[in-house]
């Protein structure tokens, strides 16, 4: 029986890890061990995701807590802790899920110990070198022996960077495996109604408090956008606590409180709850990559306030549109989503990317049967 270590840090990484862990656990040829590495005091994985994929048993998972510190300090802590785990577990293969600092630290440590590394969700590129995760993606792929990619752009990027094509496997998007499984169990929960909204009666807004809107001027622009959008449809903002802190820090909390037709959700939401809010929304306005894939599969128009995206397929054939911080363009596109006009051809795209069908984990296991 081959022992495989699956490693994830942030929430997007756990959405990749969970279905893969489940598929490997059901195959008697493998002994999967999930290593979840998170800041101290944070739940390592959403409870509903853990329940869906059998990640609750202590025998199948190891949780490693990280103390507060700079990214470099935490990377060093990940590598130190991961070295002890890898030496003890002696895995046949280390599979890193995602592109956060935990994935980078795990890949570095495994490579230094001479253990083979597989990159899950490999080959994605935004070509924004200022983005720390872009550096991580490049470094992880450089150390990996095997590369499991979620879309064709990943194949092209890796082969152009010199990776042998027999080491690249197009298997689909594991995040959609998580989406399918979680929605099967959560589909009947009236989450939007529980927050006072009928389905398709509100816009969902998700913001990164450490991104563009951590500064006062972009945050003021966001308040103008919220005022404009809320004049056309209700606005729902989950995970609001950190944004609230920024508003107070910049003295904008009073201005925000004057905006009508905005509902905030301060309490933490399970993954299923967030997915149901997305499904029932009329659109998603965001500056983070999380949920862009799910929005495409759910056919929810997504306006992404970024200059580039690492998953171009969500833009090429999905519902995602990059709008940057162009306030006028964002307002125009919001209007066209609610009242289709000149951008109708973009807001009405419905094609689901190839192999985004909930079977990516099964394809990875089939490949592992050949290569491990």
Image: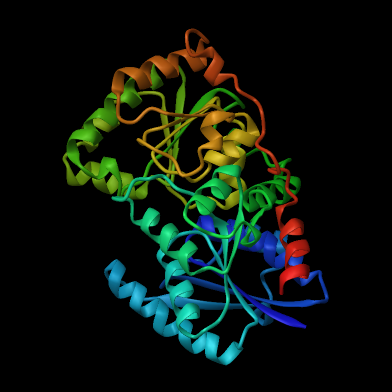
The relative height of residue 267 versus residue 40 in the rendered view (above or below) is above
Figure quadrant of the C terminus: bottom right
* Percent of width and height locating residue 199: 62, 27
**Corner quadrant of residue 127:** top left
Q: Residue at x 69, y 39 (%)?
A: 354
The relative height of residue 46 versus residue 30 in the rendered view (above or below) is above
The relative height of residue 235 versus residue 211 in the rendered view (above or below) is above
Q: Residue at x 16, y 40 (%)?
A: 251
Q: Is residue 51 visible?
A: no
Observer-nearest of 238 and 37: 37
Q: Is residue 250 visible?
A: yes
Q: Residue at x 30, y 46 (%)?
A: 211
The relative height of residue 194 versus residue 7 in the rendered view (above or below) is above
Residue that lies at the very extreme toward the top in this rendered image: 341
* Percent of width and height locating residue 31: 73, 79
Observer-nearest of 177 and 45: 177
């Amino acid at each position: 029986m081959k022992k495989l270590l699956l490693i994830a840090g942030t929430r997007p990484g756990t959405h990749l890890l969970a279905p893969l862990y489940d598929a490997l656990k059901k195959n008697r040829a493998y002994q999967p061990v999930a290593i979840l590495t998170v800041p101290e005091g944070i739940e390592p994985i959403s409870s509903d995701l853990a329940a869906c994929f059998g990640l609750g048993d202590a025998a199948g998972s190891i949780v490693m807590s990280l103390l507060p510190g700079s990214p470099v300090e935490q990377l060093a802590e990940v590598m130190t802790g991961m070295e002890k785990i890898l030496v003890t577990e002696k895995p046949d293969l280390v599979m890193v899920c995602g592109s956060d600092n935990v994935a980078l630290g795990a890949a570095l440590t495994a490579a230094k110990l001479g253990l083979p590394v597989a990159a899950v969700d490999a080959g994605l590129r935004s070509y924004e070198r200022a983005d720390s995760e872009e550096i991580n993606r490049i470094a992880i792929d450089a150390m990996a022996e095997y590369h499991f990619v979620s879309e064709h752009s990943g194949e092209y990027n890796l082969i152009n960077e010199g990776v042998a094509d027999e080491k690249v496997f197009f298997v689909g998007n594991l995040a959609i495996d998580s989406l399918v499984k979680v929605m099967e169990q959560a589909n009947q929960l009236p989450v939007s109604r529980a927050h006072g909204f009928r389905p398709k009666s509100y816009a969902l807004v998700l913001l990164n408090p450490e991104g563009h809107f951590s500064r006062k001027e972009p945050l003021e622009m966001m308040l103008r956008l919220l005022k404009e959008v809320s004049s056309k449809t209700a606005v729902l903002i989950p995970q609001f606590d950190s944004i609230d802190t920024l508003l107070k820090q910049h003295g904008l909390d009073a201005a925000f409180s004057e905006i009508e037709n905005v509902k905030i959700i301060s309490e933490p939401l399970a993954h299923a709850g967030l997915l149901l809010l997305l499904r029932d929304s009329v659109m998603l306005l965001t500056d983070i990559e999380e949920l862009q894939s799910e929005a495409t599969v759910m056919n929810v128009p997504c306006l992404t306030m970024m200059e580039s995206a690492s998953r171009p397929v969500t833009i090429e054939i999905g519902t995602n549109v990059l709008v940057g911080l162009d306030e006028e363009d964002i307002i125009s596109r919001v209007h066209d989503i609610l009242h289709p006009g000149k951008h109708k051809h973009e807001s009405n795209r419905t094609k689901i990317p190839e192999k985004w069908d909930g079977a990516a984990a099964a394809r990875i296991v089939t490949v592992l049967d050949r290569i491990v």
